[in-house]
């Protein structure tokens, strides 16, 4: 079986035209950036109101690092909400509008249809991530954060969009109802980002969640922490925390932000790199599973190919 074309397909071009047509996509992008902008403004107002009565103990570099941490975490949660909403209806929406059979009856291979649907959804979310760059550029005004600090965080964003997109596409192939597909995809996204984080916290210190914090220095206790559970390598929030810089140097997870003997090999990888590799493999598997779920039965493919060959003879 040949691999799908990496270049944009006709299905992707059609879906992008439909998504970008009208005011809705511009409204979504505006709201997305407005939420991040409001968070940045609220953070800065609170920061300066605190430092004004605190004899200036906080330096601008620390403010830049904390602003970057805040924006990155909120953007990850925005991705968890927006990605299922933009991809969950890729197949179930076509079925609900009774146009999916027309796509399968066309000469486009099933793998190209699935690949085009995924690329259209991912491309729309990448536009939103790109639109957030001006808001993130505010951190450069304070210092403390450089371009090498932004790259790992945005790699986690892109891979999370890809992972949640393939999950939503697979769920969309399993149901013909758009509302069910959206709700299930949203639930899975929240479980991945919130549920796995809470599970990792509980496994890190059973019955001692009170001594752990999700802000500041998460997953770290007073005593020397034990290695994180392997499930943390699949957690987008943990991967992001391992990529964000800490105020005291290093990353927010400190020594927990690395994986020894990653994938059974004698490697020591940052947790966000292990997450990137694992999510990339799982996304490829989900694409193949989705293609198998929607592929027409063999007898119909055979009849369609025979009719096409007979038309070519006359």
Image: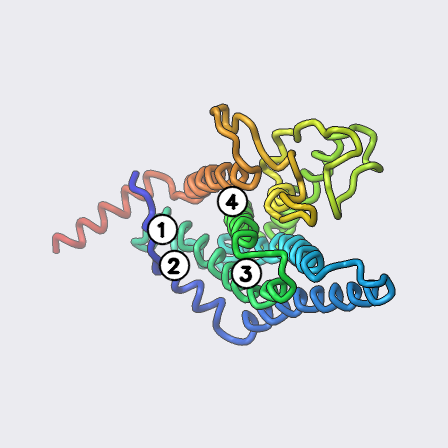
Q: Earlier in the sequence, mark 2 or mark 1?
A: 2
Q: CA distance from mark 1 to mark 3?
A: 25 Å
Q: CA distance from mark 4 to mark 2?
A: 17 Å
Badge 1 marks a residue whose secondary structure is helix
Q: Which residue is mark 1?
A: 112
Residue at point 52% right, 52% down? 148
- Asked whether disc 2 touches disc 1, contact meaning CB atoms under 8 Å apart, the reply is yes
Assess disc 3: are there few (<14), some (14-19) or many (≥20) residues with their C-alpha within 10 Å of its C-alpha: many
Residue at point 51% right, 47% down? 159
Assess disc 2: are there few (<14), some (14-19) or many (≥20) residues with their C-alpha within 10 Å of its C-alpha: many
Comparing 300 with 39, the one in front is 39
Q: Earlier in the sequence, mark 4 or mark 1?
A: 1
Which numbered tag is attached to residue 72?
Answer: none
Q: Earlier in the sequence, mark 4 or mark 2?
A: 2
Q: Residue 182 in the image: x percent, y percent?
A: 61, 53
The image's colouring method is rainbow
- Asked if 132 appears above or below 226 in the picture, the reply is below
Q: CA distance from mark 2 to mark 1?
A: 8 Å
Q: Earlier in the sequence, mark 1 or mark 3?
A: 1
- Asked whether disc 4 touches disc 3, contact meaning CB atoms under 8 Å apart, the reply is no
Q: Residue 84 in the image: x percent, y percent?
A: 58, 53
Comparing 194 with 270, the one in front is 270
Badge 4 marks a residue whose secondary structure is helix
Residue at point 57% right, 37% down? 271
Q: CA distance from mark 4 to mark 1?
A: 15 Å
Q: Which residue is mark 3?
A: 129
Which quadrant of the view contains residue 13? bottom left
* Residue 65 seen anywhere in this rendered image of the structure: yes
**Farthest residue, direction left:** 314
Q: Which residue is mark 2?
A: 11
Which numbered tag is attached to residue 170?
Answer: 4
């Amino acid at each position: 079986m040949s691999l799908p074309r990496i270049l944009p397909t006709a299905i992707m071009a059609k879906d992008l035209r439909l998504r970008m047509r009208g005011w809705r996509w511009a409204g979504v992008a505006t709201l997305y950036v407005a939420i991040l902008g409001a968070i940045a403004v609220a953070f800065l107002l609170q920061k300066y109101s605190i430092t004004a009565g605190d004899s200036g103990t906080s330096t601008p570099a620390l403010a830049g690092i904390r602003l970057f941490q805040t924006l990155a975490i909120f953007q990850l949660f925005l991705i968890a909400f927006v990605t299922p909403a933009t991809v969950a209806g890729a197949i179930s929406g076509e079925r609900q509008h009774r146009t999916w059979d027309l796509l399968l009856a066309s000469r486009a291979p099933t793998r190209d249809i699935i690949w085009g649907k995924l690329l259209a959804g991912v491309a729309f979310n990448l536009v939103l991530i790109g639109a957030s760059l001006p808001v993130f550029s505010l951190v450069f005004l304070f210092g403390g954060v450089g371009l090498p600090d932004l790259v790992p965080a945005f790699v986690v964003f892109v891979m999370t969009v890809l992972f949640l997109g393939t999950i939503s596409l697979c769920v969309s192939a399993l149901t013909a109802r758009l509302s069910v597909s959206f709700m299930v995809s949203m639930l899975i996204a929240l479980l991945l980002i919130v549920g796995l984080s809470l599970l990792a916290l509980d496994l890190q210190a059973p019955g001692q969640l009170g001594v752990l914090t999700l802000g500041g220095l998460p997953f770290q206790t007073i005593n020397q922490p034990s290695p994180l559970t392997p499930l943390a390598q699949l957690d987008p929030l943990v991967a992001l925390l391992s990529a964000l810089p800490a105020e005291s140097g290093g990353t927010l997870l400190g020594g927990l932000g690395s994986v020894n003997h990653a994938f059974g090999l004698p490697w020591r990888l940052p947790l966000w790199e292990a997450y990137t590799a694992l999510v990339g493999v799982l996304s490829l598997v989900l694409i193949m599973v989705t293609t198998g779920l929607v592929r027409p039965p063999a007898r119909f493919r055979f009849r369609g190919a025979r009719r096409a060959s007979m038309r070519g003879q006359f």
